[in-house]
Amino acid sequence: MEDELQRLLDTELQAEALVKDAEHKREQMIQQARADARTAEHQFEARLPELRAAFLQKAEERAAQAVAEQDRRYGERGEQLRRLAQEREREAIGAAIALLIDPDRG
């Protein structure tokens, strides 16, 4: 009987040691996970200026592209208006000459 009690006591002590070891390992894993999360957070924060710069560069490129497109459209519209003005000028000159040549026609 005494042997059985001793065996049970030994088993209980072994179980307690296993539990203690498991708790210690769990705490180490938690600490490691926290350290890994802090490291990842610091790395992300360190990259923020780079990410912002890349975002701003792309935004500036898109803005420059939009401005260039507006300039192109503005140039095309200006060219179209100049052609129309020249046509109207020729028509006005033709009408003025016709009026000078034959004042009764007008």
Image (spheres, rainbow, N blue to C red):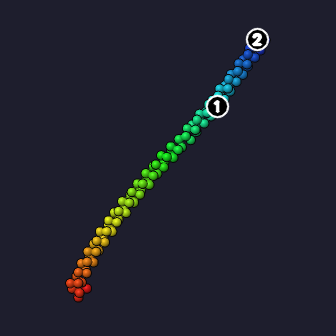
In the picture, residue 90 is in which quadrant? bottom left
Disc 1: which residue: 31
Q: Residue at x 58, y 35 (%)?
A: 39
Q: Which amino acid, by three-letter code, is at mark 2?
A: Asp
Q: Which amino acid, by three-letter code, is at mark 1?
A: Gln
Where the C terminus falls, by quadrant?
Answer: bottom left
Give residue 12's position: percent from left, percent from top: 73, 19
As helix, strand or loop, the secondary structure at mark 2 comes to: helix
> First in sequence: mark 1 or mark 2?
2
Query: Residue extending furthest right?
Result: 2
Residue situated in front as seen by the camera: 102 or 19: 102
Q: Residues within 10 Å of mark 1 (few under 14, many from 20)?
A: few
As helix, strand or loop, the secondary structure at mark 1 comes to: helix
Disc 2: which residue: 3
Q: Residue at x 49, y 46 (%)?
A: 53
Q: Residue at x 79, y 11 (%)?
A: 2
Left or right of 60 in this view: 99: left
Can you say whether 94 is above or below 10 in the image? Answer: below
Q: Residue at x 71, y 18 (%)?
A: 14
